[in-house]
Amino acid sequence: MAFTNILTSNFRDLLHDSFCMTEEILMDRVFRAFDEDLDGFISMKDWVQGLSTFLRGSLEEKTKCKLTMTSLCKGNYVIPIT
Ligand SMILES: [Ca+2]
């Protein structure tokens, strides 16, 4: 079975069905953290790398991922997403 790129709406369904997430803003931030190349899709590479970081990433990798989910980095500043 071929892997198909995952769109935001499909990713939300996956997070809801698999992890019982209900907050859309949180799901969108997880999507953003997984979509490292910011092309609007979760590719096979994005998916494997994202899961790897969540499950087995180093402290630095998990911290970077959490920052991506909770804030936007602009220049040398971290700006919380509201
Ligand atoms: Ca992507």
Image: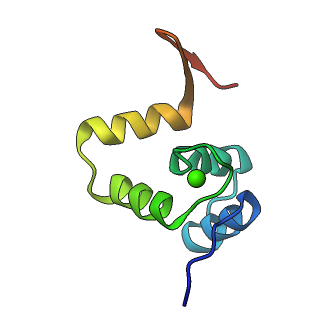
- Percent x, y for residue 12? 69, 61
Q: Residue at x 71, y 62 (%)?
A: 7
Q: Quadrant of the C terminus?
A: top right
Q: How is the image coloured?
A: rainbow
- Percent x, y for residue 10? 71, 67
Residue projecting furthest to the right? 9
Relative placement, left or right, of 73 versus 9 is: left
- Percent x, y for residue 40? 68, 50
Residue projecting furthest to the top? 76
- Percent x, y for residue 79? 58, 16
Give the vertical position of 1 relative to 18 (above or below). below
**Residue 65, image quadrant:** top left
Q: Residue at x 70, y 68 (%)?
A: 13
Q: Residue at x 72, y 57 (%)?
A: 8
Q: Quadrant of the N terminus?
A: bottom right
Residue projecting furthest to the left? 58
